[in-house]
């Protein structure tokens, strides 16, 4: 690296860790680091984190990634993060309660009430789902009125980091679109949607495009890290930033993210929506660009679940055992709804299950069923997005799950699409945040230069016979299994639901 080369720092606040990467002017990743996070589940369907832990993990990851680097070469910082989280601050910026996360399912009643707001779906482009931010605030307003009365600002997770970095209340359009307070077509806050939860624009951060500067690094932090008071880009929600990281920035391009959640993401050059199938319609992290997204709440996390349940030492051992056992027809069926589901069911009460077990079923069978069940859930989401007319020929795969040759080939067979793996896919959101940081200080730079698709490392072509079997036999069985178990989810919710007085 030339002595004068500039660096760009990307920070991604995930659910399980904070990741940091440094890229140079050529777009190459020069260093990366991560620091772990934990999630609390104090009651059924609750999912929370302490924002103080986010900041501690950020400081640790940034400190590690800067080791051995001349931090003065860092020209800008970009942010990415888990979407939808409700971080509630008082007038002194004190955190009022643990942040309620994207996979929290407590606010289903409040969602039903928000759906009655005139023009709700037309403005937001989405169904009201418990994972989104607005119903969380409606829940706090009802069940924790003392907390709600002290709320001065509501920040999304990555924008809490921005506050700690810059002292500013700012966000970007892609992350804001996941709150249900944004007019997604106009890319600005909706006064009517805010009023529906007892809030107004004074409670909200200012909205920027993801590639715009949104604050500067505070002097005391710059001195501590050996940096200048560089601009901090508005950044993007994790999926939008992940798409930027692998060059998914133009109409018709698509990606599949295999992280804690499973996401199918397709770019559109205009606003589209299909709320009736629980497809998410959001702004992209780049100006004048939108995207459609299907989301399943549990994807790679299901592999961790089954590995723990069946005694595998780790997910790698589970994958190796499934591959060695090989593919067979009519095995056990797995429903991946461990903490509910979004696309296409919008059901926070749904739960996971294994069915079609026999006396000879072993843990390799359950491992294979888990891989297949997540794939069939992803197929549900892809079909929902394609129902809008937005169809991609091939799909880039990112996320930790993309490391498995066996699983990615199975997913290609299930989905019936060519899957493309690219270098850097495992750090997609942090890489995308770093690219947005570069655009923030080089607004005239070519998008093709700053956000190219990384080199292809592997291609998974679908097997036509296997795809036909999955589509015609296993997928209908998968859907029927959910419908037949659905009444049990509702009954269990009535008995286990926690509603504080």
Image (cartoon, grey):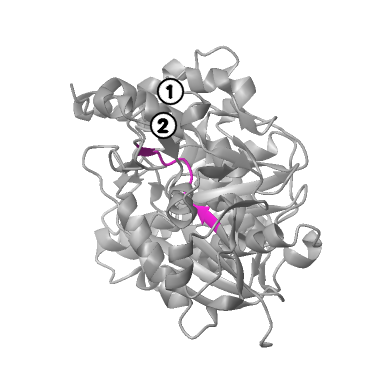
Do the CB atoms of the residues marked 1 and 2 lie less than 8 Å apart?
yes
Quarter holding residue 307: bottom left
The mark that comes first in sequence, 1 or 2, is 1
At which x and y percent is residue 466?
Answer: 60, 57
Decide if residue 285 is on the left or right side of residue 403: right
Decide if residue 254 is on the left or right side of residue 141: right
At which x and y percent is residue 438?
Answer: 68, 64
Task: Read off the magenta span.
Answer: 79-89
At which x and y percent is residue 62?
Answer: 45, 70
Residue to which mark 2 is pinned: 130
Image quadrant in which the C terminus is located: top left
Quarter holding residue 273: top right
The residue drawn where x is 31% and y is 43% is: 94
Q: Residues within 10 Å of mark 1 (few under 14, many from 20)?
A: many
Which structural element holds mark 2?
loop
Q: Is residue 428 magenta?
A: no
**Residue 187: in sight, yes or no?**
yes
Residue to which mark 1 is pinned: 111
Which structural element holds mark 1?
helix
Image quadrant in which the N terminus is located: bottom right
**Residue 472: in sight, yes or no?**
no
The residue drawn where x is 59% and y is 22% is: 121
Decide if residue 69 is on the left or right side of residue 287: left
The residue drawn where x is 31% and y is 44% is: 48
């Amino acid at each position: 690296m030339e002595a004068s080369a500039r660096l760009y720092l990307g920070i991604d606040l995930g659910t399980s860790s904070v990741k940091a990467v440094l890229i140079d002017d050529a777009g190459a990743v020069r260093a990366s680091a991560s620091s772990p996070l934990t999630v609390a589940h104090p009651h059924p369907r609750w999912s929370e984190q302490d924002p103080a832990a986010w900041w501690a993990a950020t400081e640790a990851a940034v400190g590690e990634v800067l080791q051995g680097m001349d931090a003065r070469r860092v020209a800008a910082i970009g942010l990415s993060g888990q979407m939808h989280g409700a971080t509630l601050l008082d007038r002194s910026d004190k955190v009022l309660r643990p942040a309620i996360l994207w996979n929290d399912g407590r606010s289903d009643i409040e969602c039903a009430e928000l759906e009655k707001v005139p023009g709700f779906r037309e403005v937001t482009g989405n169904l009201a789902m418990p994972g989104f931010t607005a119903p969380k605030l409606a829940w706090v307003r009802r069940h924790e009125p003392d907390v709600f009365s002290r709320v001065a600002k509501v920040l999304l997770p990555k924008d809490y980091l921005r506050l700690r970095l810059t002292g500013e209340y700012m966000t970007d359009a892609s992350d804001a679109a996941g709150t249900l307070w944004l007019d997604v077509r106009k890319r600005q806050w909706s006064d009517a949607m805010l009023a529906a939860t007892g809030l107004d624009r004074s409670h909200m951060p200012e909205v920027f495009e993801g590639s715009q500067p949104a604050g500067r690094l505070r002097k005391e932090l710059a001195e501590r890290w050996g940096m200048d008071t560089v601009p901090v880009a508005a950044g993007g929600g994790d999926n939008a930033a992940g798409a930027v990281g692998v060059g998914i920035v133009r109409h018709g391009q698509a990606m599949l993210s295999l992280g804690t959640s499973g996401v199918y993401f397709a770019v559109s050059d205009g606003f589209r929506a299909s709320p009736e199938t629980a497809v998410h319609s959001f702004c992209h992290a780049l100006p004048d660009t939108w995207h459609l997204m299907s989301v399943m709440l549990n994807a790679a996390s299901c592999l961790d679940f089954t590995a723990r349940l069946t005694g595998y030492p780790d997910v790698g051992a589970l994958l190796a055992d499934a591959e060695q056992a090989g593919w067979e027809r009519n095995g056990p069926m797995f429903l991946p709804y461990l903490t509910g589901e979004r696309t296409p069911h919008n059901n926070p009460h749904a739960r996971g299950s294994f069915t079609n077990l026999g006396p000879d079923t072993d843990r390799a069978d359950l491992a294979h069923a888990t891989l297949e069940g997540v794939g069939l859930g992803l197929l549900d989401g892809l079909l929902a997005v394609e129902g809008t007319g937005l169809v991609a020929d091939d799909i880039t795969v990112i996320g930790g799950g993309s490391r498995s040759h066996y699983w990615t080939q199975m997913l290609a067979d299930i989905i019936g699409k060519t899957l493309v793996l690219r270098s850097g896919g495992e750090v997609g959101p942090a890489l995308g945040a770093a690219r947005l940081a570069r655009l923030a200080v080089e607004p005239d730079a070519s998008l093709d230069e700053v956000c190219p698709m990384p080199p292809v490392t592997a291609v998974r072509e679908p097997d036509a016979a296997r795809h036909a079997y999955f589509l015609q036999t296993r997928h209908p069985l998968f859907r029927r299994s959910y419908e037949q178990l659905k009444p049990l989810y509702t009954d269990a919710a009535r008995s286990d639901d926690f509603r504080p007085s």
